Image: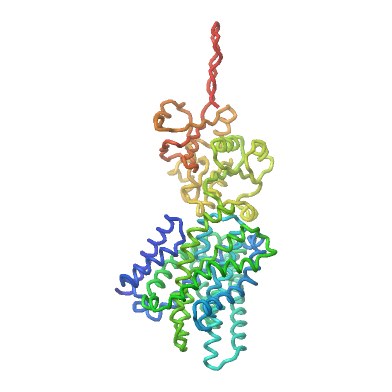
């Protein structure tokens, strides 16, 4: 196959693996490795060394740079208030201990020589945002422990890569008769270039953006070009120093308060997802099965020792005094999956060691892949239930987030709670929250789009959002802001004054949420009807009573608003959705008041009972 065909095959296989991972709610690296091995060593469809030649390693490096930039771009400095105590210990004390213990394990357990053992110890420092971030998203960990693990992954990735490069440089310089001071000079140069290029270019670029010197349609492509340029320039001083530079560039840009950053995050997330797929398919495809078979069995003991002994030991040693309780520390002890930087760095550095005469370096790449694969399989499949047992993760995303407190939304929230649903009402005006607070409804006072809300509001269990304020544009803005995280199918708003999608005055579907309930159920109408004593009515369905029976018996004006599935999940009824309740489901409807039947004279019977 020519190189164009190979690239297309790699992308298609990578996207198929990503889709499978999304459906299974599992980190994408596992199916990517499996698909890559099948396409490479097993069936021989992809042969990276033959098809890409010397261009393979530079391409992998550029892709890793984009992934790290995107990870840095997503980090918010205000999260340090939740993660700083544990993070400082994981970085300042955890990294040296991980390097030391990883080296000792590789040498004394795996029987590997000191040069390769030190390189393995350096690479094993990283946990990897390409695995940790999807794992946190799927496991729904609470904010404090999630912030700590997220920052550890991002910060340790370039540190581990640089440490590995310096370690390799030490052994290569030793072969050539160099001194330790040469290593010190390389380290100082790498840090200086990383800070100067990464943070400096980010700050200068932000000034350019604020002055409006770049057209809107060029902002994303120029950012893309700058990231690659910073990576290459930093690597001219020391290989892999570019990883530190692009990470710092992402963190700096992400925390300067630029309006374009949110769009930048989304664009870079799409690029990062594509790069991750390409990297792992290529790296997995170039694994040598013969090298795996030739490795002594004792080397494979390194992986379980690193996962089951070394990581818990590091947490035990560095966490005393941190603002993490014992349950959070247990979660941290079991959450150290390795990712793309660990695998890619091992593949990039092994050839230089082999060329210098270190024969056992042939085991580096397969050993790193084994560590990545096993850690992702074990921790990716067990972290969520493990954290839930410890009370450090949400059990499901069944919570309904209601934006805007009003008489109607208060009554609706109370009705949702009455059917067993979990709900939270958010408003930025304190007196409007008085009614839901008195009704026993959980509330949050603040602006939902603010940094304060992002830093303090626990949203890991939120699966659906409903914007019910009187401001149509604000409702649309909130829905558009939360759609990338919750999914557009899970964000709803009341109908806008121009509800017709064909009306040019209305917002396009991508810039607002789905219309809830009915095209006529605007804020004013709901407010009037709640004043007119309309009420919420719950209807359970069974084998003998279906939705068709409900429609025959219900008032023609009644409006279905929420469906609770038998498993407890909540579904807001969309204006144009097809409602299909099943036995065991409960439907919540907004219905008119039941007319009072006057008592007939001479009849001893009382009034008819009204439904609650």
Q: How many marks?
A: 0
Q: Is residue 364 above or below residue 594?
A: below
Location of residue 19 in the rendering, given as x and y in whole percent from the top left corner: 40, 58
Residue lying at the far top in this picture: please name it: 602
Residue 14 image-quadrant placement: bottom left
Location of residue 35 in the rendering, given as x and y in whole percent from the top left corner: 37, 66
Location of residue 495 in the rendering, given as x and y in whole percent from the top left corner: 50, 40
In this rendered view, identify the residue nearer to me: 202 or 100.
100
Q: Give the position of the C terminus as an image quadrant.
A: top right
Residue 179 image-quadrant placement: bottom right
Residue lying at 46% horizontally and 76% vertically, measured from the top left: 298
In this rendered view, identify the residue nearer to me: 408 or 38.
38
Location of residue 285 in the rendering, given as x and y in whole percent from the top left corner: 37, 72
Q: Give the position of the N terminus as an image quadrant.
A: bottom left
Q: Is residue 5 visible?
A: no
Residue lying at the far bottom in this picture: please name it: 177
Residue lying at 46% horizontally and 66% vertically, measured from the top left: 374
Colouring used for the render? rainbow
561 on left or right of 36: right
Residue 472 image-quadrant placement: top right
Q: Is residue 439 above or below residue 401?
A: above
Residue lying at 34% horizontally and 69% vertically, measured from the top left: 39
Q: Is residue 518 visible?
A: yes
221 on left or right of 259: left
Residue lying at the far left in this picture: please name it: 1
């Amino acid at each position: 196959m020519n190189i164009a065909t190979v690239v297309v095959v790699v992308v298609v296989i990578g996207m198929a693996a990503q889709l499978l991972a999304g459906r299974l709610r599992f980190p994408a690296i596992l199916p990517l490795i499996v698909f890559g091995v099948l396409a490479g060593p097993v069936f021989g469809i992809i042969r990276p060394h033959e098809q890409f030649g010397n261009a393979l390693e530079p391409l992998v490096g550029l892709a890793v740079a984009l992934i790290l930039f995107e990870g840095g771009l997503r980090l918010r400095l205000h999260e340090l208030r939740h993660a700083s105590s544990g993070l400082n210990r994981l970085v300042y004390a955890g990294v040296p201990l991980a390097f030391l213990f990883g080296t000792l394990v590789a040498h004394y357990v795996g029987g590997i020589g000191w040069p390769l053992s030190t390189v393995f110890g350096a690479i094993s420092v990283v946990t990897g945002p390409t695995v940790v971030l999807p794992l946190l998203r799927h496991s729904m960990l609470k904010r404090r422990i999630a912030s700590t693990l997220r920052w550890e992954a991002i910060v340790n990735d370039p540190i581990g890569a640089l440490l590995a490069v310096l370690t390799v440089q030490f052994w290569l310089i030793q072969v050539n008769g160099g001194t330790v001071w040469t290593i010190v000079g390389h380290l100082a140069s790498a840090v200086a270039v990383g800070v100067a290029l990464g943070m400096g270019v980010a700050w200068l670029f932000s000034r350019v953006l604020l002055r409006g010197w770049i057209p809107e349609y060029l902002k994303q492509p120029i950012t893309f070009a700058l990231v690659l340029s910073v990576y290459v320039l930093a690597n001219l001083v020391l290989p892999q120093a570019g990883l530190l530079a692009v990470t710092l560039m992402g963190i700096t840009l992400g925390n300067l308060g630029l309006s374009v950053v949110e769009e930048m995050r989304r664009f870079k997330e799409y690029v990062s997802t594509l790069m991750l797929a390409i990297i792992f398919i290529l790296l997995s495809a170039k694994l040598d099965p013969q090298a795996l078979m030739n490795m002594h069995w004792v080397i494979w003991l390194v992986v379980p020792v690193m996962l089951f002994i070394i990581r818990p030991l590091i947490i035990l040693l560095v966490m005393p005094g941190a603002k993490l309780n014992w349950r959070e520390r247990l979660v941290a002890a079991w959450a150290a999956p390795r990712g793309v930087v660990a695998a890619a760095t091992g593949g990039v550095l092994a050839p230089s060691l082999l060329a210098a005469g270190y024969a056992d370096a042939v085991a580096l790449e397969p050993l790193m892949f084994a560590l990545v694969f096993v850690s992702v399989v074990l921790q990716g499949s067990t972290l969520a239930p493990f954290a839930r047992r410890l009370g450090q993760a949400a059990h499901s995303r069944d919570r309904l987030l209601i934006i805007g407190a009003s008489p109607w939304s208060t009554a609706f929230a109370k009705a949702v709670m009455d059917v067993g649903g979990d709900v939270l009402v958010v408003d930025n005006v304190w007196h409007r929250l008085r009614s839901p607070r008195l009704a026993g409804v959980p509330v949050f006072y603040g602006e939902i789009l603010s940094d304060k809300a992002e830093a303090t509001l626990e949203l890991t269990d939120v699966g659906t959002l409903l914007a019910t304020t009187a401001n149509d544009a604000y409702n649309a803005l909130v829905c558009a802001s939360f759609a990338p995280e919750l999914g557009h199918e899970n964000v709803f708003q009341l109908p806008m004054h121009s509800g017709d999608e064909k009306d040019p005055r209305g917002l396009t579907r991508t810039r607002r949420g789905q219309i809830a309930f009915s095209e006529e159920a605007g804020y004013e109408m709901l407010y009037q009807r709640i004043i007119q004593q309309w009420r919420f009515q719950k209807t359970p369905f069974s084998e003998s009573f279906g939705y068709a029976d409900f429609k025959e018996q219900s008032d023609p004006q009644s409006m279905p608003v929420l469906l609770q599935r038998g498993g407890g999940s909540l579904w807001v009824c969309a204006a144009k959705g097809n409602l299909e309740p099943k036995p065991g489901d409960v439907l919540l409807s907004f219905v008119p008041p039941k007319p009072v039947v006057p008592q007939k004279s001479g009849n001893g019977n009382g009034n008819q009972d009204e439904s609650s």
